[in-house]
Image (cartoon, rainbow, N blue to C red):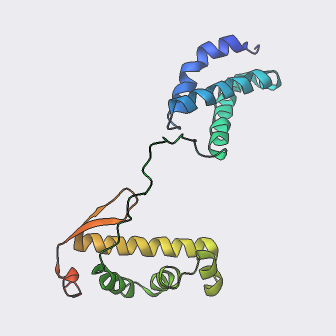
Amino acid sequence: MDTPNLETLYITMHDRLCLFICSRTAYAADAEDILQDVFLRIHTHLGSVREVEKLESWIYQVARNSIIDYYRRGRRLVELKNDLPAELEEENEPDPGLAPYLRQLVESLPEPYRQAIQLTDYEGLSQKEMAGRLGISISGAKSRVQRARLKIKEMMLLCCHYEFDKRGAILEYRERCCCCDDNQPCR
């Protein structure tokens, strides 16, 4: 079986590759750039394809590699407008009434998770430093911190209704049970 020429491949593969790439990128213009890169790579290396029967899977692998290269190159640059305000909006500070409640939640965690939060969030150690202090792997330390934070979040959501901003900071909360009132534990 002969290798099809680039024009034939373009006609038969363009739309499918476009859909494949668009489903993996956020911007249509970037997807079009990646698609052009894919066809450039196909043109450059088409002669080195050994198994013509596997040509389509080879083309999709070229597309996957081009998408990976796109993400490795970094984030898309966006021009900023000249009329941006001089000051950024003020950060929302968490309600000081939540601090004792959060401390209570941390204290109720099982020991490995409590220790992870105390070392990273209260003592300010990095997860790498925490791993060294506890004699565990860095991935193990990261996992403990993530699981501990997830457990705290689950406990908080059982107790109260929270509204978050786009960065995840608490904007507002409403009590659902006794634990937010006078720091009483839930029954």
Q: Which residue is at a point 63% across and 73% down the rendered structure image?
A: 138
Q: Quadrant of the N terminus?
A: top right
Q: Nearer the viewer, residue 80 or 140?
A: 80
Q: On the picture, is 87 further left or further right than 12?
A: left
Residue 10, how many percent across, how many down? 64, 16
The percent coordinates of residue 73 (x first, y second) are 67, 44
Which quadrant: the C terminus? Answer: bottom left
| Residue 115 image point, x, y percent | 49, 86
Q: Residue at x 79, y 25 (%)?
A: 45
Q: Is residue 74 left or right of residue 28?
A: right
> Which image quarter: residue 65?
top right
Left or right for 11, reference 6: left
156 lies above or below 19: below
84 and 153: which one is in front?
A: 84
At 51% across and 42% down in the image, what residue appears?
80
Q: Residue, x 77% and y 13% (percent of image)?
A: 2
Query: Which of these two is toward me, 45 or 101?
Result: 101
